[in-house]
Amino acid sequence: MSIINGGRRCAACKYLRRRCSEDCILAPYFHPSNPYRFACVHKIFGASNIARMLQHLPVHKRAQAADAMAWEAYWRVQDPVYGSSAIIAHLQHEISKAQNELEITRAQIAILQNFQQTQPNQQLQAFWALEDEPFVQPDLPHI
Amino acid sequence: MGGTPPCASCKLLRRRCAKDCIFAPFFPSDEPHKFAIVHKVFGASNVSKMLQDLPFQQRADAVSSLVYEANARIRDPVYGCVGAISQLQSQVKQLQMQLAMAHAEILCFQMQNDSSSLVNQQLEVDDDGGENKSFLLNNNMIMTSVPQSMNFSSSSSVFPESLKRESLWI
């Protein structure tokens, strides 16, 4: 039995119904209190693939690798078609939106600065009249 | 008797490529690397089960995303796709900060404009020999609302910021 888990089998060995040896490579990263985590990882990657991938990594990197694989497996179980790619696509879309908005805002600032420099005594009535309208994202073509 | 060549998966697995091979439509024989990386990361039987659980019209997209994730994991054996997600989240945060600063700058212009128009009004109304009235700069400034664009989605936090093992997911 694995000493790491105080004599209990790790989630992996429990799931696979096998003896959990003292040097079980999966035991440190798949605690028996969270069987769902290993179930996801096993469904997507397979226990032997996970063990092999962890074995190829230095020990101090294995915890992070196991976490990352657990997250990827979880997202793939939640979304069997796109998995974590959906999240990446969503973030890329958010970045694109934010960049567009930043460009527009900076252009507005440039106009304001120019107006201030060239006509310091003038009120920016016309400009702010436009600003009373709620900001509407311009219809930009999809790339 | 010319038959179709075996698909990349059956070629790699050294087996007969059946007519109804589940991999054949998505792993053509001229792209062997595609199946090789997917098999290396996920395993052929896991991929087969995943595809079998999906309707046919969704399988092509599923294969594309699996290839993408497998590539990411081969490039970065520790973090895989999660590394890319983490980087993108930082980018989103940075842009949010820059956007907030830009909006604050616009707010400053607005406040300057409002305060100077208040001053002008004061000077027009109080025409009694230059008594030094307060400029009402601090208390009565009209605070205009921040543009609605500040509310762009903060749904970019899809998982805990750090991959600490103490997270909920462990």
Image (tube, helix red, strand yellow):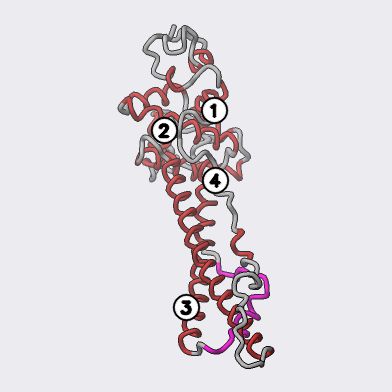
User: Helix, strand, or loop for circle 4?
Assistant: loop
- Label the magenta part by its dominant secondary structure: loop
Q: Does B143 appear in magenta?
A: no
Residue under disc 1 on the same chain as residue under disc 4: no
Amino acid beneath label 2: Val
Amino acid beneath label 3: Ala
Q: Nearer the viewer, residue B23 or B5?
A: B23
Q: Residues within 10 Å of mark 1 (few under 14, many from 20)?
A: many
Q: Which residue is mark 2?
A: B41
Q: Quick one: label 1 or label 3, which is nearer the N terminus?
A: 1
Q: Residues within 10 Å of mark 3 (few under 14, many from 20)?
A: few
* Residue A13: mark in rendering: none
Q: Which residue is mark 1?
A: A40
Q: Which residue is mark 4?
A: B157
Q: In the rendered image, is residue B1 in sight?
A: no
Instruction: Return the chain for callout 1.
Output: A
Q: In the rendered image, is residue A2 in sight?
A: yes
Instruction: Return the chain for callout 3.
Output: A
